[in-house]
Amino acid sequence: MATDHRAEVRDFLATRRARISPEQAGLTVYGGNRRVPGLRREEVALLAGVSVDYYTRLERGNLAGASDGVLEALARALQLDDAERDHLLDLARTANASPRARQRASRQAVRPSVQFMLDALTGAPAFVRNARMDILATNRLGRALYCQMYDGAPRLAPDGTARPANSSRFIFLDSRARDFYPDWNVAANNNVAILRTESGRNPYDKGLADLVGELSTRSEEFAALWARHNVRRHYSGNKVFRHPVVGEIELLFEALSLAEDPGLTFTVYPAVPGSPSEESLRLLGSWAATEDAAAGDVTPAPGGALPDGALRPEL
């Protein structure tokens, strides 16, 4: 599935324009029926201080040469939040980038020192993912938390090679995800918004485009969410899981970009000290250790990989 950059720009701007009423934009409306939802192109142009012809060119997908001042004015006119503004700037950078600069793929390798950091975190689940939501490495608690994502036969790519666990495939293609995420709709919306954000940063990542194509084909829900062009920042907050072994557990999360590994994100899920979820994490750690012992005292290899059978819950 190839990325059509002009279509990405066009659909993003059109969906942002459609959600804002003239009243929300502070415009006075004269007359009755309006044929389009939200703002008209000429109204956006007026708010942004550009000509109608120029804005029309932008919305048709041509951001090449657009200045930072124009992009900022457009962001204000469309009332973009910080994530949407960043997405617009990413789309503009891609439009102005040289063909050679566009060829970037999501990283797959995790350096040993990063795995050592993961393993040193024994009180909270932690993992490293790339831009297309592949889980590349975990600590013991991280793998235990996502045991359902890992269990079963290894999933293979079309070329027959093994591919890492992927949270997007789990959410949209594994029925157990609807139990694992008590608010599945929130998890699904956030996941798609993260992928859409990453697509704007790196639209020529073939692996990411292939993942979007696969999910769009196999999941109507994914395809509908993808068409909304929503984006978001996802650096901190809290999440609730319903784990098959320890039950419901609420965790905070902090996501950090690895400066030496562009495209990789290091995420930690701590529990509030003294909370029931902290006790649930202790139980999860005990269960994981028991599973390891039953599997022959297996120690995670670099990348968090374990042989089949390790950390498999009794469901």
Image (cartoon, grey):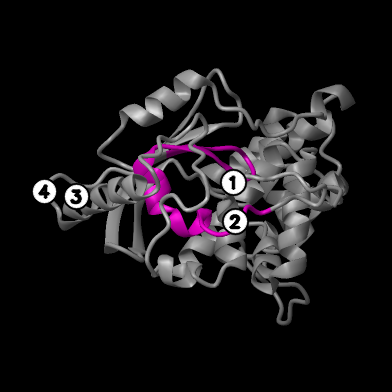
Given the image, on which type of amino acid does mark 3 rest? Answer: Glu
Image-quadrant location for residue 58: top right
Residue placed under numbered mark 1 in the picture: 133
Q: CA distance from mark 3 to mark 1?
A: 26 Å
Label 2 environment density (alpha carbons within 10 Å; few <14, some 14–19, many ≥20): many
**In front: 284, or 298?**
298
- Seen at 61% across and 28% down, the residue is 109
Can residue 135 be seen here? The reply is yes
Magenta residues, start to end: 127-155
Choose the circle earlier in sequence order: 1 or 2.
1
What label sits on residue 234 in the rendered view? none
Q: Which label is found at residue 278?
A: 3
Within 10 Å of disc 1 (Cα), the crowding (few <14, some 14-19, many 20+) is: many
First-in-chain label (1 vs 4): 1
Mark 1–mark 2 distance (CA, rounded to whole Å): 6 Å
Image side of residue 190 versus residue 291, left or right: right
Q: CA distance from mark 1 to mark 4?
A: 31 Å
Q: Dot 3: what SS?
A: helix
Q: Classify 115 as above or below 40.
A: above
In terms of depth relative to the viewer, which is nearer, 134 or 11? Answer: 134
Mark 4 element type: loop
**x%, y% of residue 260?**
55, 18
- Residue named by callout 2: 168
